[in-house]
Image (spheres, rainbow, N blue to C red):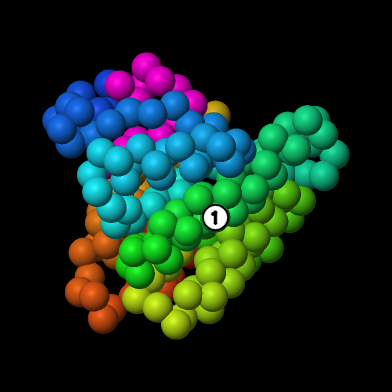
Amino acid sequence: MVLGARSEDRLRELAAELGGDEVAVPRRCDVTSFDDQEALVREGVERFGALDAFFANAGFGAARGFLKETPEHWRSMVETNVLGAAFSIRAALRRFREQDSGHMVLTSSVAGRRTLPGSLYSATKWAVTAMGEALRTEVADSPIKVTLVEPGQVDTPFFDNRPTGALTADDVAGTVIFALSQPPHVDLNEILVRPINQSA
């Protein structure tokens, strides 16, 4: 697999933890750069011969309230959460079409299914949900799969005050692996996963 993120140090650590270059190749990638995303796909194909799946998981949030945060923070969030996901789709889809196979996995959110007061972040996740459905209908003439993973609250550095009773990163990873491990005739379009105590 090829691992892409902006933080090269963390990428190298993760790649080593997963088994080194034979298993996981770290590559710096800014998802707001289409050139970076194309290079990520190219690296995967050159190293492993095909692109079996692409997991688009980059994103960050903002404080709720349309008078909160700076316009610059908003712009960066929209470019990462929305344009970044669109670039991932575009970079992967060309290869998926060439090989007539592949699986696109997009991280949306519970926030992409309901309106949160004053949340531009929620709007970005609504956009990802819409892109997932738009892609699924575009590739309906092929064996290409599309899965939207929609986590509820997850205990990650995303939050300033870490939540209790939330999902873990491993919980979400297990959900992604479950989607990817389905037989060829099964396409899990949406997986909504919440911690047991999250009601909305």
Name, please, the residue furthest toward the right: 67
Q: Reply above or below: 40 against 179.
A: above
Crowdedness near tag 1: few (<14), some (14–19) or many (≥20) residues, C-alpha within 10 Å: some
Could you tell me which residue is drawn at 73 percent across and 55 percent down? Answer: 117
Q: Reply above or below: 147 against 185.
A: above
- Indicate whether residue 14 is drawn in magenta: no
- Asked whether the viewer can see residue 151, the reply is no
Residue sitting nearer the eye, 121 or 40: 40
Q: How many marks?
A: 1
Q: Is residue 78 left or right of residue 144?
A: right
Provide residue 128's location: percent of width, then percent of height.
58, 59
- Indicate whether residue 9 is drawn in magenta: yes
Q: Secondary structure at mark 1?
A: helix
Provide residue 33's location: percent of width, then percent of height.
60, 36
Could you tell me which residue is drawn at 50 percent across and 41 percent down? Answer: 37
Could you tell me which residue is drawn at 41 percent across and 57 percent down? Answer: 95
Could you tell me which residue is drawn at 25 percent across and 56 percent down? Answer: 177
Provide residue 57's location: percent of width, then percent of height.
46, 46
Residue sitting nearer the eye, 157 or 134: 134
- The residue range painted magenta reads 1-12
Identify which amino acid the numbered label 1 is placed on: Arg
Provide residue 3's location: percent of width, then percent of height.
34, 36
